[in-house]
Image (cartoon, helix red, strand yellow):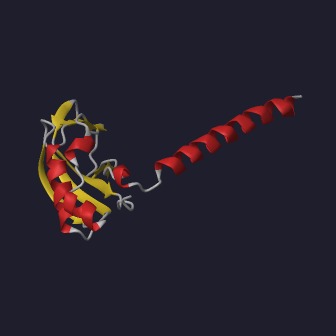
Amino acid sequence: MASRARQRPASGVVAVFAALAALAAVASTGCADDSDPEVGALRVDQLREGGLVMPVLESAPSPSFPYPAEALEEGAGGDIVLRIRITDAGRVDSVAVVTSSGHSVLDSAAVEGARQLRYRPAQHGGAPTAIWAQLPVHYPAPGPRG
């Protein structure tokens, strides 16, 4: 009996994974309308002793990172890694492209989008502090229009 009790949750887990896989398949159909840029997690450039509290994104990333019309028309997509400085007030005051997408229009849009982001600043020793970090931005290649 105990082995059956263990099998039931496993089959339930399989059903959940199957449902998630089906949703993922539907979500990745490649429609032109599904080309929203994705902003990845921050990676802090420097380590500090004594309890660094990471910055927290407070603004919504999607409106800050519009997909340039020119890139949509060309079917351009790509990954960009930005180096950003988040001030002790939570604003991004410096942005540089570390890894280019190969499309200058996407790189420029990512830089401008990053400048619009607002964070709850990092904390070090209980006080707000400026921090450098890397921010990945993904512009999915738009699917065929139809």
Query: 70 above or below 116?
Result: below
Q: Residue at x 43, y 56 (%)?
A: 30
Whether residue 128 sits left or right of residue 37 in the image: it is left
Q: Which one is in front, 44 or 16? A: 16
Q: In the picture provided, is 62 more to the left or to the right than 14? A: left
**Picture quadrant where residue 107 is located:** bottom left
Residue 59 lies, in percent from the top left, at 22, 36
Query: In the image, what residue occupies the spot 20% across and 62% down?
Result: 70
In the image, residue 1 above or below residue 99: above
Most foreground residue, 94 or 141: 141
x%, y% of residue 97?
20, 62
Relative placement, left or right, of 117 versus 17 is: left
Q: Position of residue 8 (x, y in %)?
A: 77, 32
User: In the rendered image, which quarter contains the N terminus?
Assistant: top right
* Residue 22 horizontal/vertical position (percent): 58, 46
Point out the residue furthest to the bottom here.
102
Residue 102, picture quadrant: bottom left
**The quarter of the displayed image where residue 49 is located:** top left
Residue at figure coordinates x 74%, y 38% from the top left: 11
Residue positioned 18% across, 56% down in the render: 109
